[in-house]
Amino acid sequence: MLPPPLERALKVLVIGGGGREHALAWKLIQSPRVEKLFIAPGNPGTALLGENVPIKATDIEALVRFAQEKAIDLTLVGPEVPLAAGIVDDFQRVGLRIWGPSKAAAQLEGSKVAMKEFLRRHNIPTAQFKVFAKAADAHAYVEEIDGPLVVKADGLAAGKGVTVAKNAVEAHEAIKSIMERQDFGREAGRQVVIEEVLWGEEISVFAFCDGHNAVLLEYCQDHKQALDGDQGANTGGMGAFAPVRTLMRPRDEDEMVRRILVPTMSGLVHEDRPYVGLLYMGLMLTDSGPKVLEYNVRFGDPECQALMLLLKTDLVDVCEACIDGTLEKTTLDWHEGVSICITMAAKNYPADNYLKDQPITGLDSPEALKAQVFHAGTSIAGGKLVSSGGRVLSVCALGTDLDQARAIAYAACDAIAYTGKHYRRDIGRRQEARKARK
Ligand code: AMP
Ligand code: GLY
């Protein structure tokens, strides 16, 4: 008997150039369905997997032109900025297949104010909050509360526009930074959200979505603060591991689906902006159940890197099911064991004056070769690999358990060298640290 006909081999484009996009590219080229992979703009790591295209992730017009010229069959968008700017609508307008939420659906992440108002409209559990358009009113509110508060810039701020203020002094400083100095730009600084502090364990919940159906991925935990013991400034993410099985009790899971996931999906359908792509729900597991800290409209970085190592199912099939509205028939298969991703950052990160242009060595050491290293902020200068971003590398490993995954990944981090390298030593150890303190 003849074998069944092969489906047409696909030309796939990944948009973005960080560790998340390197991990997506790494996963995609394992698909027998992918014939050719382009990454725009990519990085020195993705250059080894496919063809980097020198177009910025924000240059939507040029990306549409490129996808048309090359007859790209499927485009995956990594970062939030092009999604919030409407890249999905622009691709679809000219008949190109693209995986991600529409501009209207992507506003869930674009504005914290809009996100909190969505949560309130649909009665989805979240921290109590107030919105301020005038710095003086925000300062007055801080005086009135006189206790710990969270201050958030309204617009996109690369994960850095949030301050969990222990006291009024820190809250006033955050308001000054966001609204008066406009450290995150004029748009992001127009309004602030001030909300109550939620206490509990933080967990990243991801779901593939096709507009109406959602399929949950393995739960993941990120470590947002720069220093061990969850000290220091908030960053884009210093390390993650998955699966996280012990944190989400069955009661929490049931509540998360019933009170968060389902009303989020149906709320968006009701508002005529059904969600397609990857929905990221940052949750706090509080004593009174899970509450939404934030939505993101794309994969987390570095959570994506850990999840791509763990996912067995062909990513192309899942993305197509999202686009075609056939997720109901999709289940996800996972490798056994635990996957971890350690962010190797630059000296001074997350401050803007992080150290750049440092030559990187040790990627070909036996220790690094046992791990899976994704490039996050690197470039080639004078024929050499150098650091160019605040987060430089994502060092990942899949182990039989968390200890083994940690051992492989940390041996690689130790073997990789560049001036000013910084990484947390305690990724995956938060629960133990909490227990030890009790
Ligand atoms: P966001 O970008 O809103 O997720 O905030 C970034 C980080 O700040 C979160 O991942 C939490 O670690 C922390 N955070 C945000 N909101 C709160 C809150 N209401 N209570 C406690 N921590 C928070
Ligand atoms: N790791 C957190 C984020 O991607 O927003």
Image (spheres, rainbow, N blue to C red):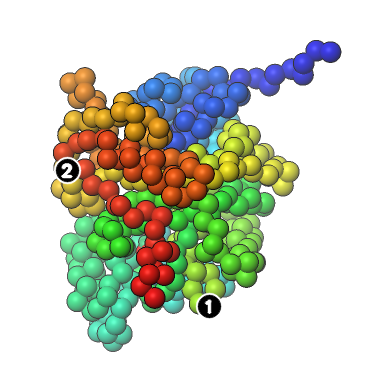
Q: Which residue was labeled with disc 2?
A: 420
Residue 149 can be seen, yes or no: yes
Total labels drawn: 2
Spatial CA span between label 2 and label 1: 42 Å
Task: Give residue 296's position: percent from left, percent from top.
Answer: 46, 54
In depth, the one of 42 and 349 nearer the eye is 349
Residue 332 coordinates in the image, percent (x, y): 64, 43
- Amino acid type, label 2: Gly
Q: Of the residues under marks 2 and 1, which one precedes in the sequence?
A: 1
Q: What SS does tag 1 mark?
A: loop
User: Residue at the location (17% across, 34% down)?
Assistant: 358
Q: Position of residue 213 (x, y in %)?
A: 67, 51
**Image quadrant, ligand 1:** bottom left
Say which residue appears at 21% left-offset and 19% top-offset.
383
Q: In x, y percent, where is residue 301?
A: 40, 46
Reading the image, the residue beneath label 1 is 288
Residue neighbourhood size for the residue with mark 2, other residues' Cα within 10 Å, grouped as few (<14), some (14–19), many (≥20):
few
Kindly identify the amino acid type of the residue bearing the numbered disc 1.
Answer: Ser
Nearer the observer, 412 or 351 = 412
Residue shown at 56% from the left, 51% from the top: 218
Which quarter of the rendered picture does the N terminus lie within? top right
